[in-house]
Amino acid sequence: MARSNDEVAALLQEYADLISITGGDAFRARVHEKAARAIGGHHADVSTLDLKGLQEIPGVGKSIAHKVLEYFDSGSVSAVEELRAKIPAGVRRLTAIPTLGPKKALTVYEELGVSSVDELADAVHQERLRDLKGFGPRTEENILHGIELLRSSGDRVQLDVASDLADSIVAALSEVTGCLRCAYAGSLRRMRETIGDIDVLVASGTPAPVMRAFTELPYVTEVIAHGEKKTSVRTAKGLAVDLRVVPPDSWGAALQYFTGSKAHNIRTRELAVHQGLKLSEYGVFDVESGEKTVSETEEEVYARLGLPWIPPTLREDRGEIEAGLRGELPGLVTEADVRGDLHSHTDLTDGLAPLEEMAEAAARRGYAYYAITDHGPDMAMQRMTDERMLAQREQVRELDGAYPTRGARGGLRLLHGAELNIGPDGDVDWPARFLAGFDLCVASVHSHFHQDREAMTRRLVRACENPYVDIIGHPTTRIIGRRPGVDADLDAVFAACARTGTALEINAHPDRLDLRDEDILRARRHGVRFAVDSDAHSVLHLANLRYGIGTAQRGWLTADEVINTWPLTRLRRFLRKGRAPR
Ligand code: DGT
Ligand code: CA
Ligand code: CA
Ligand code: ZN
């Protein structure tokens, strides 16, 4: 994973924000924003590219390419620094409030001197915003709601950010002499949707060199605590990391303990107590003799408690202990079960890569089949037409089977689909006649998020009832930390999905993870099928599927409940749904 691409993308995005905040040219802001997205999604590490290579990235012109080179030469970009100097960091932080926007952020700063999120909340409560042009009671409500969203996500980071960092820490520490085992534990191992801090575990008889290597990692900016057993640091992105070094013969007990969750651990400790045992991060001990019985592997620890090994994604005390005791833990879906991705975009709409590159990358992942689902014409920005869609279909048919893959002897099977837009009344982009030509259709809500509960429920149910809608994409449309899910009677929607044979998507993008774990648990009680999809807008996004699988596991899903683990013939039968036979 090219971390430098993320850095540059963040910098260009910040620059775009700064341009907007300072009232600069809106077009210039958009150009930089677009380049930020392109670089974030680019397959090659941008720190290795020269001027020419950089300019080959779509949306990257000469001036942006020069900024990127300047960044890698000197560690900063003068144009960005100039704007940074004009705008206090607190004001920039205001733009992180999802409902505020750069223009209003500048207004409250210039007119009221508000330069932090707390000050803004105070100003709202003191009704000081009311006198400003363009601010009404409705704006105040929106701002307070935005502040609440920002605060509820707190200092937690998204799954992909923590994953990338943890992977590179584990890789680095595994190289240190004396490190016998290294893994991450905590909420990241359980694949929670956001991560408070990373917990890394090392088994070693000689902690000192491991601790030293840890504090000397290049992205460590601050050492919070330095000890024999535990060291805590803060990293460049603000994320904290705890490292614990344990004796090799305590590895299993420590991994179990520090994986959590706290609620799960309370239950395992109770189980131990009932059997005259004591469970700690050092092992399972006999209370009477004080003798250690097991602790080397997690399997042993669970077995000693009378349990099978419980997958980390289930360890939330949501019934996994009871299921384990009864021998009824689900056989969870894994990434290896997945035979294809059913939601992805190309540069025909808002994706970054052409069809060929996306398909080739899907084949590299070993898929048996792969669906291209660009946006329909109802999202006007995407400029889709019937002709363009049909031309793409021809291209898809031509390339069907052209890419060798582990997953299918005759090459990757390409499906031609679309991501339809579910309009306010539940209608979708095209009439039945046109829709009948697609192999599959994903349908999603992209606007009118604030309909009342009844209207929103009706809208989603109508979409399910459309015989050409096979999958409801990102069903609640929430964006983690930025936008709450829509208000709908989800049980009614889930029941409609089950009744009509419409699958619910588990959108694997780490910003979305939609459906979320709790909704999946609810939906599966209705007998719904699911599709775990990347919704990839670039080649790199295809790998996000792992986060969707983690989320599916947290929803207790088995492979049989996930349609894109099925062989193509079974999948096609599902996709025929209520359609007239062809
Ligand atoms: P996070 O960091 O907020 O995303 O969530 P976790 O689950 O990673 O929590 P963290 O980092 O505070 O602790 C890691 C694990 O260590 C936690 O899942 C369970 C274990 N642990 C920590 N403190 C306690 C405790 O006071 N009691 C018990 N039973 N376990 C604890
Ligand atoms: Ca943690
Ligand atoms: Ca921790
Ligand atoms: Zn999409």
Image: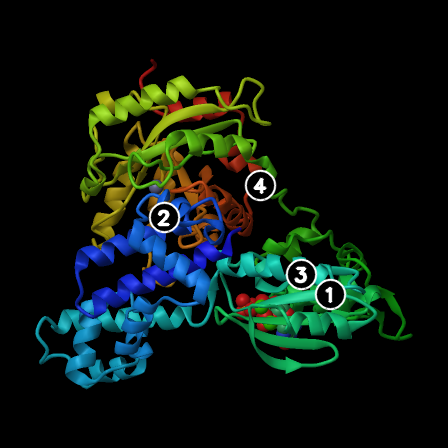
The residue labelled by disc 2 is: 38
What is the distance, in whole Å, between disc 1 and disc 4 at their CAs? 26 Å
Pointer 4 or 3: first along the chain: 3
Q: Amino acid at mark 2?
A: Ala
Residue ID at (9%, 80%): 131
Q: Are marks 3 and 1 in contact (CB under 8 Å)?
A: no
Q: Is residue 82 left or right of residue 572?
A: left
Kind of element beneath mark 1: strand
Q: Amino acid at mark 3?
A: Ala
Q: Nearer the viewer, mark 4 or mark 2?
A: 2
What is the distance, in whole Å, between disc 4 and disc 3 at their CAs? 25 Å
Measured along the vertical axis of the image, is residue 348 above or below residue 484? Answer: above
Residue 202 badge? 1
Question: x and y percent of residue 531 in the render?
Answer: 45, 38
Residue ID at (54%, 25%): 567
Q: Nearer the viewer, mark 4 or mark 3?
A: 3
The residue labelled by disc 3 is: 172
Q: Amino acid at mark 4?
A: Glu
What is the distance, in whole Å, between disc 3 and disc 1 at their CAs? 12 Å
Is 38 or 536 nearer to us in this picture?
38
Can the viewer see residue 128? no
The residue labelled by disc 4 is: 335
Q: Is residue 521 left or right of residue 472?
A: right
Kind of element beneath mark 2: helix
Q: Amino acid at mark 1?
A: Val
Pointer 4 or 2: first along the chain: 2
Question: x and y percent of residue 35 in the render?
Answer: 32, 51
Kind of element beneath mark 4: helix
Q: Quadrant of ligand 3?
A: bottom right
- Dot 2 beta carbon under 8 Å from ligand 4: no
Question: Is disc 2 surrounded by few (<14), some (14 to 19) or many (20+) residues within 10 Å?
Answer: many
